Image (tube, rainbow, N blue to C red):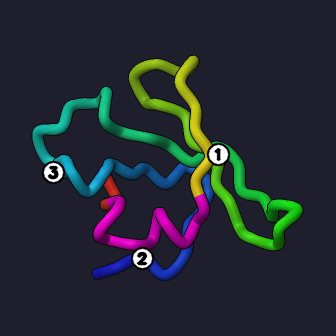
Amino acid sequence: MALKSVTLEDHFVSAGRSAIGCGIAGVWRVIQLFEGADGVAYARLVNAADRSLTKTVATAALLDRTLFRHAS
């Protein structure tokens, strides 16, 4: 079942990797949700294995199964 929204603490992996066997290094956790100055909803992500690695992604991209998969 596809996610309809992104919430804090959700975990994602790139769709280029399978959720099984990608290892914790490929898992990203949502730590912040915000609306950008452009009116787009964004999520700040932190790498589950290395908290010094962060990235910001539009929540619409996280919900696009061709780009990301939800990891439980």
Q: Earlier in the sequence, mark 2 or mark 3?
A: 2
- Secondary structure type for disc 3: loop
Q: Which residue is mark 1?
A: 44
Q: Earlier in the sequence, mark 1 or mark 3?
A: 3
Q: Give, as a three-letter code, the residue at label 1.
A: Arg
Q: Give, as a three-letter code, the residue at label 3.
A: Ser
Query: Taking 2 as reference, is 35 above or below it?
Result: above
Q: Quadrant of the N terminus?
A: bottom left
Q: Quadrant of the C terminus?
A: bottom left
Q: Residue at x 36, y 39 (%)?
A: 27
**63, 71: nearer the viewer:** 63
Q: CA distance from mark 1 to mark 2?
A: 17 Å
* The magenta segment: 58-68
Q: Residue at x 74, y 70 (%)?
A: 40
Q: CA distance from mark 1 to mark 3?
A: 22 Å
Closer mark to the observer between disc 1 and disc 2: 1
Check contact, mark 1 vs mark 3: CB within 8 A: no
Q: Residue at x 35, y 59 (%)?
A: 68
Q: Which residue is mark 3?
A: 18
Query: Measured from the top left, where is residue 12 in percent x and y?
Result: 39, 51
Q: Quadrant of residue 31?
A: top right
Query: Measured from the top left, where is residue 15 in percent x and y?
Result: 26, 57
- Left or right: residue 17 versus residue 38 is left
Q: Residue furthest front?
A: 38
Query: Taking 34 as reference, is 60 above or below it?
Result: below
Closer mark to the observer between disc 2 and disc 3: 3
**51, 58: nearer the viewer:** 58
Q: Give, as a three-letter code, the residue at label 2.
A: Leu
